[in-house]
Image: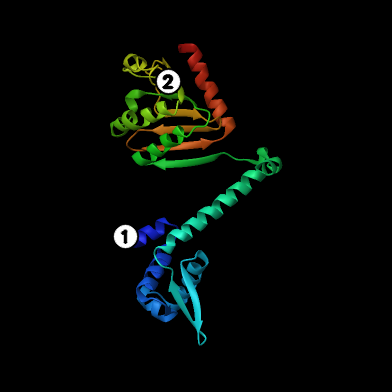
Amino acid sequence: MLAKILTDLGLSKKEATVYLSTLRTGSSGISTIAKRAMMSRSTTYNILHALKLKGFVKLAKRTNVQYFSPIKPQEIVDVLTAQKEELSEKMALVKTFLPQFEAIRNPAAETPKVSLYEGINGIKQVYEDILKCKNKETFAAVSLDNISPRIKKWLIQSFTPRKIKRKIRSTMLIGSKQANSYRKLDKKHLRKTCTVPDKKYPFEVEIDVYDGDKTAFISFDEKELMGVIVESPKIARSIKSLLEIAWDKYR
């Protein structure tokens, strides 16, 4: 449990093990700590120096022998506070010089970024990313009948209320037998929908275009349960244009 907390704070598993070993041994030489941590002396030596740089242990020399002491548990808060302050300073510095960085960036050299998310939790991650959209607008195509029952409840109880709270508006093409009942909630859910004949034009995956440069594809097929986010302004504009053609025809 304690090792897990330390790894959550940014230490590696070995660093967490060595720090906890120093807590148990107190100020000790490398050999004693290595024995307690059940690691080689050389590995323990390297880890102790890494922990020293991170502020988790202190080094003292007595008659040319190195002794390492752990910081007190309450001092971990001080270390984290210092890291937070340092990070805030770095963020402020980067923000100050963002215009200069942007000025030398070559947009033509950029390549699309593709992220794959697998399983139900992966699909939820895609929806979470949609909730972060800065322009507060999405354009989507989906067949309601294809949505996995395993995620439908989460969409109704968690995703949709948060989407409304964040005032994210949606324009949606839907293919479904439930289209009429779904459209009755359009105003409440901040969306506009139109129905596309799903037998003629089936939507086998959900498509969401948002933020001007992101396109998400979500497959609810149990054999390939996954979501993909493609970050590319050109791809996003092209997919949106295709969806708008369908929208103009069927609205």
Disc 2 designates what residue? 190
Q: Secondary structure at mark 1?
A: loop
- The amino acid at mark 2 is Leu
- Picture coordinates of residue 99, whole percent (x, y): 68, 40
Mark on residue 1?
1
Q: Is residue 210 above or below residue 63?
A: above
- In what quadrant of the picture does the N terminus appear? bottom left
- Picture coordinates of residue 126, whole percent (x, y): 43, 36
Mark on residue 24?
none
Q: Is residue 155 above or below residue 2?
A: above
Q: Identify the residue at horizontal 47%, vertical 75% (top origin).
A: 45
Q: Nearer the viewer, residue 242 or 3?
A: 3
Q: Secondary structure at mark 2?
A: loop
Marks 1 and 2, the one that precedes in the sequence = 1
Q: Residue furthest bottom?
A: 63
- The amino acid at mark 1 is Met
Dot 2, how many residues are within 10 Å of its Cα: few (below 14), some (14-19), or many (20+)? Answer: some
Dot 1, how many residues are within 10 Å of its Cα: few (below 14), some (14-19), or many (20+)? Answer: few
- Picture coordinates of residue 46, whole percent (x, y): 49, 72
Asked which quadrant contains residue 199, the reply is top left
Q: Is residue 133 above or below residue 145?
A: below
Q: Nearer the viewer, residue 151 or 206?
A: 151
Q: Identify the residue at horizontal 57%, vertical 27% (top origin).
A: 237
Horizontal side of residue 129 vs 160, given as left or right: right
- Label 1 – label 2 distance at C-alpha: 44 Å
Horizontal side of residue 106 vs 211, given as left or right: right
Asked which quadrant contains residue 68, the reply is bottom left
